[in-house]
Amino acid sequence: MQRKSDRKRQGQRQEERQVLLDALERTRVLLTQAHGDFNAASDPDLTESYIYEIKALQARYGYLLRQIKELSGEELTQPMARPPETKKRDSSGGTLRQGPWRPISAYQ
C-alpha cells in the first residue's frame, strides 16, 4: 500500500515539474521577445514599458526556477541559472550585439 501511494505522489511531482518546466520555457520565449521589442522601440514611453515587462518576466523566471529546484530537492544555495542570452543595445550608435542577461537595474 505504501508503494502505491509513493508512486502516485512521485507521478504527481513529475506532472507538476513538467508544468513548471513548460511555464519556464514560455517565460523564456516571452523574455526573448520582450528584449527584441525593447531593442526595436524608439519611443521613450514604449522603451520604459518594455523595461518593466522585462523586469517582471525576469522575476517570473526566477520564481519558476526556484519552484523547480524545490520540487526536485536541489539546494537553493547554488547560483540561479540565467535566462538565455539576448541581444541588447550597443552604446555606440544603437546597433545590436550579443550579450549576457543582466538585471534591468544594470541598465539604469
Image (cartoon, rainbow, N blue to C red):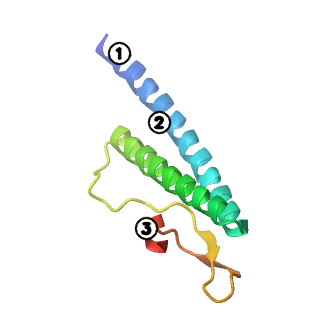
Could you say which is closer to the camera, residue 2 or residue 62?
A: 62
Task: State the residue in front, 20 or 48.
Answer: 48
Task: Decide if residue 67 is on the left or right side of residue 85.
Answer: left
Q: Which is closer to the viewer, label 2 or label 3?
A: 3
Distance in Å between CA atoms under marks 2 and 3: 30 Å
Work out whether 104 lies above or below 56: below
Q: Which residue is mark 2?
A: 17
The residue to which callout 3 is attached is 105
The quarter in which the N terminus is drawn is: top left
Q: Along the polypeptide, which appears first: circle 2 or circle 3?
A: 2
Question: Can residue 45 be seen by looking at this rendering?
Answer: yes
Residue 58 x, y percent position in the rendering: 49, 55
Residue drawn 72% across the image and 69% down it: 42
Q: Where does the image place residue 65, in percent across and percent down from the top left? A: 43, 48
Q: Which residue is mark 1?
A: 5
Q: Nearer the viewer, mark 1 or mark 3?
A: 3
Q: Residues within 10 Å of mark 2 (few under 14, many from 20)?
A: some
Distance in Å between CA atoms under marks 2 and 1: 18 Å
* Residue 63 percent across, percent down from the top left: 41, 46
Whether residue 103 is visible, yes or no, is: no
Work out whether residue 76 or residue 95 is closer to the camera in this orientation and state it: 95
Residue 43 point in image, percent of width and height: 70, 65
**Residue 33, quarter of picture:** bottom right
Q: Is residue 27 above or below residue 13?
A: below
Mark 2, secondary structure of its residue: helix
Residue at (49% x, 56% y) in the render: 55
Query: What amino acid is labelled 3 in the image?
Result: Ser
Give the SS element for disc 1: helix
- Marks 2 and 1: CB-CB under 8 Å? no
Q: Residues within 10 Å of mark 3 (few under 14, many from 20)?
A: few
Tell which residue pokes out farthest to the top in this image.
Answer: 1
**Residue kind at label 1, given as amino acid type:** Ser
